[in-house]
Amino acid sequence: MKPIYKIAAAALMFSFTSCLKDLDTLPLDHNRLVAEDVYATPEGYEGILAKCYGSLIMTGQTGPDGNRDVPNIDEGYSGFTRALFYLQVGGTDEIAVHAGGSHGTRDILFMNWDASTKVVSYPYYRLYMTINYCNELLRETTEEKLRDRGVYEALANEYEYYRAEARFIRAYCYTVICDLYGSGPFVDENSVVGENPNQRTRREIYDYAVAEAEAAADLLKAPKSNVYGRVDKVAAWFLLSRIYLNAEAWVGENEYEKAYQNAKKVIDDGSYPLDKDYRHIFLADNHTASEIIWPLVQDEDHSPGHAGTNFMVKALVNGVMNNYYPTGVGARGWGNARVKTQLVNLFDVQDQTFDANDIWGNNKKDKRAQFFTIGHTKETWRSGQAFQNDFNTGYASIKWRNVLKDGTDLDATYTTIDFPMFRTADAYLMAAETILRGASGSRAEALEYVNEIRDRAYLSGSYGTSASGQITDSQLTLDFILDERARELHTELVRRTDLIRFNKYTSGYNWDWKGSDGNAGNHVGKDVSAKYKLYPIPQDEFTVNPNLAQNPDYN
């Protein structure tokens, strides 16, 4: 059993009810959340903390198909990483999602969504639900309340860490709201239960997320000293680096030096060194991977569901593929999405195709080029045909596999792969990018960071004896960094954010089906309105909260 499930399982024993009602952004009424007797034991508080973490990987209280957290949404779609995948990956140059059209996934693919597009709302509701769980923990873990309940002595050495972790998770959620929606309602542990929250500007949400992340960096446990699945100071440094890296895109402020300093802390601390093999990070025993700073812990027994890494595997493969290599889910793949040509073309031609005699790609130069191509066209379109619900138009991604490092095929109904929310390789690339954007590090340092990532990808240098994948200083440009981020981080829920930061999301760079109507011959991408740099606040919110104003050009 993975350690975090010792507390995650406890969380499921309590009778949680949804915090959402018709409006996810109302402060939680703790009497609705959970009975008072939960707070009578130290284990109860640990369970509430587990719920704060678990709400980002699980979809309900009784498994994948019942007692869901988020009402009025298909439970599988409501899972955080799956919902975020549609908005952060499905509308970019990485993946074409062809299933789920009734939820609005085609609108994301064609970049023509509006405030009523269902899938646009799914991360929004999940984020505010998680924020409210964190608020609940913070309200109920004051020293005064713990003493009144007679549990202070038992929790004295831990409860401040619980609070710091809840503040970190909440800060992360507000960061994603800042990124996706810009502005939004604001609730914290001091909000009045039952009152509609007021909206805060993007700048105000940004400032709050920064302040909370900075506080968490001081208060969290020392690096590598927490239970697996729970965050420590390194996670806070990573979060701060990501926030500051995007500050110019989000609020017009150059904070690249702060982004660099925090990324460098992650790297120099050394608690989460790069794993020796890139491919191990996305397998069923990736809890042994050294570089995952913050995992969303998942296994078949304790967190089965149709989101999380179960989605990452099944949506990107189909059942036939299991005849060629072990997917780890047998013939249970859904085949919901395929790879766009732009992502494939970031790799050398000789690395792009799948060899049935080399299922791990050991003979490839760049081991990150994990595509299945047998029976597939490279193109995501067919001549003379409109966009098709056809998994075989476009390569499949086999980056995620529900197998063990030793090759053991789990052949399971649900995956046991932890989702790597933060990992050290991203810190290397953030540090390199900030230097190229003017931070105080040297170009030689930036080049060293990039080449370390590429050595690992090619299993060269200190990682193996294969031919080197290193680049020269003349090749090190911001455009190269953007491409390298796609090679390293594709399907890890950051691509839209990256493209916006590089001013290549709505215009200046196009990809399959961007700005299309989906008709035959219209697969070539084109520029779209700049309004799509933000998603709209879900239309249903305006029927219950008169304090909200919509994002520009979505009224």
Image (cartoon, rainbow, N blue to C red):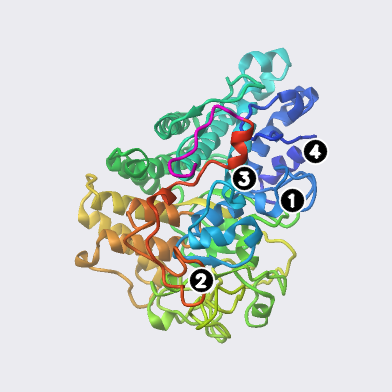
Mark nearest the camera among 1 and 3 is 3
Residue behind mark 2: 339
Image position, residue 479 (x, y; %): 29, 62
Q: Quadrant of residue 385?
A: bottom right
Under mark 3, the amino acid is Leu
Residue behind mark 4: 13
Q: Secondary structure at mark 4?
A: loop
Is label 1 in contact with label 2 (beta carbons under 8 Å)? no
What range is drawn magenta here? 545-555
| Distance from Cα at disc 1 to Cα at disc 2 | 30 Å
Residue 549 lies in magenta, yes or no?
yes
Q: Is residue 540 above or below residue 336?
A: above
Image position, residue 181 (x, y; %): 48, 42
Q: Earlier in the sequence, mark 2 or mark 3?
A: 3
| Distance from Cα at disc 2 to Cα at disc 3 | 25 Å
Under mark 1, the amino acid is His
Q: Secondary structure at mark 2?
A: strand
Mark nearest the camera among 1 and 2 is 2
| Distance from Cα at disc 4 to Cα at disc 3 | 18 Å
Q: Earlier in the sequence, mark 1 or mark 3?
A: 3
Rendered residue at 41%/74% (across/down): 366
Q: Is residue 195 above or below residue 555?
A: above
Residue behind mark 1: 302
Rendered residue at 71%/12% (across/down): 148
